[in-house]
Image: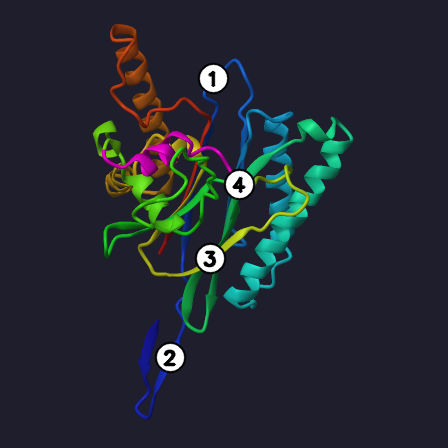
Amino acid sequence: MKFEFTGKKTEQRDIEPTFEFGAVSESKSEMRPNQDGYFVDQKNRAACVCDGVSSSYEPHDASRIVAETIADAITFAPPSATPEKIATLLSEIIVHANDRLRRISKNRTDELDMMQTTAAAVVIRQHEHKLFAVSASAGDSRILLYSPHTRAITHLTSDAADPHATHPVDPKQRTEREIQYALAAVTTAEELDDDDYLGDCFDHRNSLKQSIGREVKISPHTHIEEVRPGDILLACTDGITDTLDDQKIIAIIEQSKNPDEIAQKLVAAVKAAVAAERKHLMKFPDTVENIRAKSDDMTAVAIKIG
């Protein structure tokens, strides 16, 4: 905000915020299509990542269709809409994307093999002299917020994980959000030795309660968070967040000069971790060195608020 002294009163004016975007998306293999999809809309201050469900029909096309559907619909979001209205609109857009994907899928395959994908979208809006990041998601793609003031990451989306745990009741009575943060902090197998419930959740963290295209009706998770200049928003598929814990992501952000570099380094860090684990398993096939390392398609979109 800017304050000007006129001699009689102080006038408050909004300083137009700036936004820098960077994005990288790569397939885990040159031998198959990238099953991730994404879009970046700088004009509407929006981004989205999608991750086709590998076990479903044409996952690479499912993620593309949903990303395009969400991108097209977001262009109609009123610039003056409140964060609450944007949250409602994003939820409706994801529901619409679900309906559209199911219609397309039924024309290509049968009900038992529907096209499926995850999606996580974020829109940044200014309202009453404040900036807000409004997110909506279905599945385990994530919107993360890094604050340079706290040097911490806030999860703006819920993974909607369905661990099918051997121990279905958490003795520590943690919420789903607390479990998500705990899983994002795990770096060694020893951390799970004395926590059977968290261990089950870690082993099944890619089992989902819902995905776009699978269910007739879905309930997107929405969230509104105030953001400030200097903050970094990340939209990532699980190809990034499964392999990299939150502290590793923070380190990469703090070592990068701009959003392009952040996205590039996140993908590079995943590829390095997976390659190192493969090399370790060739020498020691019965042991695991990095329990997080997972070969998957990788998409990272970074947005810096200035």
Give residue 6's quadrant in the image: bottom left
Residue 262 part of the magenta segment: no
Residue 172, percent across and down?
A: 29, 48
**Could you give the CA–CA distance between mark 3 and mark 2, rounded to whole angstroms?**
28 Å
Residue 96, percent across and down?
A: 67, 49
Amino acid type, callout 3: His
Q: First in sequence: mark 4 or mark 2?
A: 2
What residue is rendered at 41% in x and 72% in y? Answer: 129
**SS assignment at label 2:** strand
Q: Mark 4 against mark 2, which lies toward the viewer?
A: 4
Q: Which residue is mark 2?
A: 12
In front of the other: 290 or 69 = 290
What residue is rendered at 33% in x and 54% in y? Answer: 231
Q: Which residue is mark 1?
A: 29
Q: Which residue is mark 4?
A: 209
Q: Which residue is mark 3?
A: 223
The image shows residue 64, relative to residue 174, as above or below, that is above
Amino acid type, callout 4: Lys
**Could you give the CA–CA distance between mark 1 and mark 2, rounded to whole angstroms?**
53 Å
